[in-house]
Amino acid sequence: MPEAGVIRRAAAALAVGVTVAGAQDALEGIGTLEGLTVVGSSEAVWDLAGAAAYIEAEQFRDRGYTDINQILATVPGVYLRQEDGYGNFPNISMRGADGTRTSKVTVMEDGILTAPAPYSAPAAYYFPKSGRMSAIEVLKGSSQVRYGPQTTGGVLNFLSTPIPGDGGPNFYSRTTGGSDSTFKNHTWYGDTFETDYGRWGYLLEFHGERSDGFRNFTGPAEGDSGYRFFEPMLKAFWEIDGAVKQRFEVKLGMTDFESDEGYLGLTEADARFSPDTRYAATQFDLMDTKQYRSYFRYILEPSEDFSLQSTLYWNNFRRNWYKLGDVSLTQSPAIDGRGRIGTGRTDLHTALLNPALTAVLQGNATGSIGVKANARYYNAYGWQNQATWNFTTGPVDHELTAGLRFHYDRIFREQWNDVYNANGGSNFTLFSSGVPGAESNRLQETFATAVYVEDEMRIGNLTLRPGFRYEHLDISWTEFLGPGMKMDDAYGIWAGGIGFNYEFNECHSTYGGIFRGVSVPGPRAYINTGVREEESLGYELGWRYRKGGLLVDTAAFFTDFDNLIGVDAGLGGGGNSQNAGAAEVWGVESMITYDPVFDRGLGFNLPMYLSATWTSAELQEALVAGGADNIYAGGQPGADIPYVPEWKLATGVGFIAADWGVNLDAYFTSHTYGTALNSNVPVTTARQGKIDSLFLVDLTGYYQVCENFKLVGGIQNLFDERGITTRLPEGPRTNLPRTWFTGVEATF
C-alpha cells in the first residue's frame, strides 16, 4: 500500500470529528449534487458555529463497532446508556437532556426523520443500524435551527451508503464472526455511468446481523437471548445532462428485526455475582419489528448561487414487543377488565425487591406472570424543502437558507395481556389469552408545519449564523376503550438563536452561540395530562486549534432547562410523561488528537486521541407530580440528573503501517444514579440505586492481504470488566462481557 494509504488510515484512526482524509471519498459517491447533510465532512467541522463531530465509517469498522454506543463513546458531550449490550435499544443524551429511548435527540437518516412517530411518539423503538452507514454526523447544543422537532438535545444524522462514483470501487463486502455465534455482514454493489440522457447511478445493498446473546436462563427454561435482523436497500439517481444541474434520487429500504429481549433486569445480588443470568419468566420475551423507509428527492442548482432540495418521504414501522409485564404469588388469578392479573399484581421493578416474587420470576416458585403484547403501528410521511441562496451585501457574504416541511405521523396501539401460571421448575403454562386492543386501544396523531430561516454571514474572518424556527402542531388523541373519546388541540413552538465562528488564522478559531431549544410531548400527554413542551436556553463557547499532527477542539456549555419532561417510554406500564421542573447542566468537553510522526515520511503513523467531558447536571426543583415510576421522582433541588455522568473519558493509540494496523482504545464513565433520588441502593424500586463506573479496553487490528482483501479482528472489553449500566426499564442490567471477532473485508 502506498504511503498515501498509510496517512489516510492514520486519519481514520484519529478521534471522532477531526478526520480529514477520507471525507472527500464519502462525498465522491453521491455525484455532482449533494443531498441534505448536517455537518458535511470532517473538514467542515472546523467552520461550524457550534460543537459537532463527523464520524467516518472506516473509523468504527476497523474496530468492529456496529453498536452506536461504542461509536459515540469518543464523542465528548454525548451520554450513553447501554440496555441490551448490543445497542439495539439506544438511550442517547446530549448536553444533559433525558436520554430515555433517545427521545430528546432529533435522529435522521439522509436528512429524513427516522423515529417511528417523531412528534406523536418520538421514542426510538426503531433506530438506524450503524453497520450499514458511510458516516454519522453529530451536532450538539447550538446550530440546531434547521432540525427539529427535538432541539433541546442535539442532532444525529446517519448517512447511508453512497452510490459509488466513476472511480469505484463497485463492490464491497465485510463478514465477521465471533463470540456467542455473532455474525455480521454488510455487502453492496453499485455503479455510476454516463448516457446520452445524463448520468445514472444505482446501489444494491444488504446488511444483517445475528447473535445467540450472552445471557443464560435460570433452570431448565428454554428460550433465546439474542437478536437477528436483515436490511436490504435500493438507491438510484439520475442527473440530467443540461445547462441546469438537476438530480432525481430515490431510496427504498427496510429492516426486519427480532430480539429475544424484554424489560426485566436482575436483583442486586445477581447483577453483581451472576451478571449473565436471565430469569426463566422472560422466556416468552420477543421484540418483532418491521420498518420500511423511502424517499424521492429532487435537487436543483440553476446557478452557483442558488440551490433547492425537495423531498417526499414515507416511513412505516410496526412492532409487537411481547414481554413480561408483572407477577403475582397467586396461581390461576382473577383477570381484570384489561386482561391483566387481577390478584396481587406487582410491577417488576418492585417485585425484584421481594424474594418471594423474585423466586416466581426465576421459575423456582408457583404463582403467575402477565405478559403484555405491546402491538403498535406507526406511520410518518411528509414533504420537506430547503433552499439556499448565496449573495453579497457590501462587505458581507450571505448564505441564506430557508426550509419548509409538512409532516404527519401517527401511532396506533392495539395491546393485550396474556397470563401464565408459574408451576415451579421453570415451567409456565398459558392460563388466560387476551384480546387485541383490550389492554390499550388508542390513536395519537400529529400534523406539523415547520418553517425555518438561517443566514450565515461572513465578514472577513467572522461568521455569524442567526436563525429562527417555528412549528405549528395540530394534535389529536382518540381512545377506543370504554365509551371512547376523541380530543384534539393545536399549539406552536419556536426555537432559534445566533452562533458565531471567528478564525484568528489558519490554526486558531473560536466559536459559540446562544440558542433556545424545545422538546415536544406526545398528543395524549399534552391533551390528557397537561404536559407542556420542554424548553431550554443553551450557551456555548469553544476554541479550535490545528497544526501538523495536533488537533484540539474544546468547548464550555451551559443549558438551562425549564418544564423538563420525564418521558414514559421505557418504563413499562407504570410510567407517565410529566413535567419535572427546572434543571441546569454545566460542562466542559474536549477532543485532542496527536500524531508525533505525522507527515514525516517514516512509513508508519502513531495516531493518539483523548476525549474528555466533565458535566454538572442538577435539578433545580422537586418533581412537580407523579410517583416513583418516573426517573426524576424523589429528586430535590441539587439532585444529580439520572444517567448523566460527571466524567466521560476516552483515549486511544494506534500503530498504522503500510499493510497492517492495530488500535488500543480505553473508555471510562464515572458513576451516576438510576433516579433523581440519588440513592446508592434501591429503596422502593429496583430502578433506584447507583449506576457503576466502568473502565473498558478494546484491542482491534487489521491486515491488508492485498489490494482487494483485508483481514480484521479484535477483542472488546479486553479485561472483562462488568458493572450495572442501567436500572431501566425494570431493574439492573450489566454490560457485555469480553467478546472477540474476526473476519474479512473485500473490495473490488
Image (cartoon, rainbow, N blue to C red):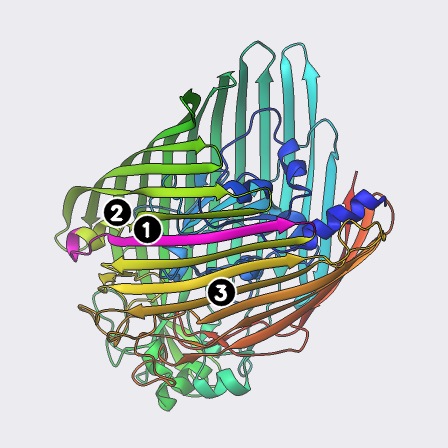
Residue at image mark 2: 444
The amino acid at mark 3 is Thr
Task: Compute the Cα span from label 2 to label 1.
Answer: 8 Å
Nearer the observer, disc 3 or disc 2? 3
* Residues in magenta, as a range: 527-548
| Mark closer to the chain start, 1 or 3 | 1
The amino acid at mark 2 is Gln
Secondary structure at badge 3 equals: strand
The question of residue 541 being in magenta is answered with: yes
Pointer 2 with pointer 1, Cβ within 8 A = yes
Residue at image mark 3: 613
Mark 1 neighbour density, 10 Å: few (under 14) some (14–19) many (20 or more):
many
Residue 644, position as x, y percentages in the image = 41, 68
Secondary structure at badge 2 equals: strand
Query: In the image, is 747 to the left or to the right of 472?
Result: right
Camera sees residue 522: yes
Residue 388, position as x, y percentages in the image = 43, 25
Is 49 in front, or is 300?
Answer: 49
| Mark closer to the chain start, 2 or 1 | 1
Residue 40, position as x, y percentages in the image = 54, 38
* Residue at x 53% of width, y 34% of height: 252
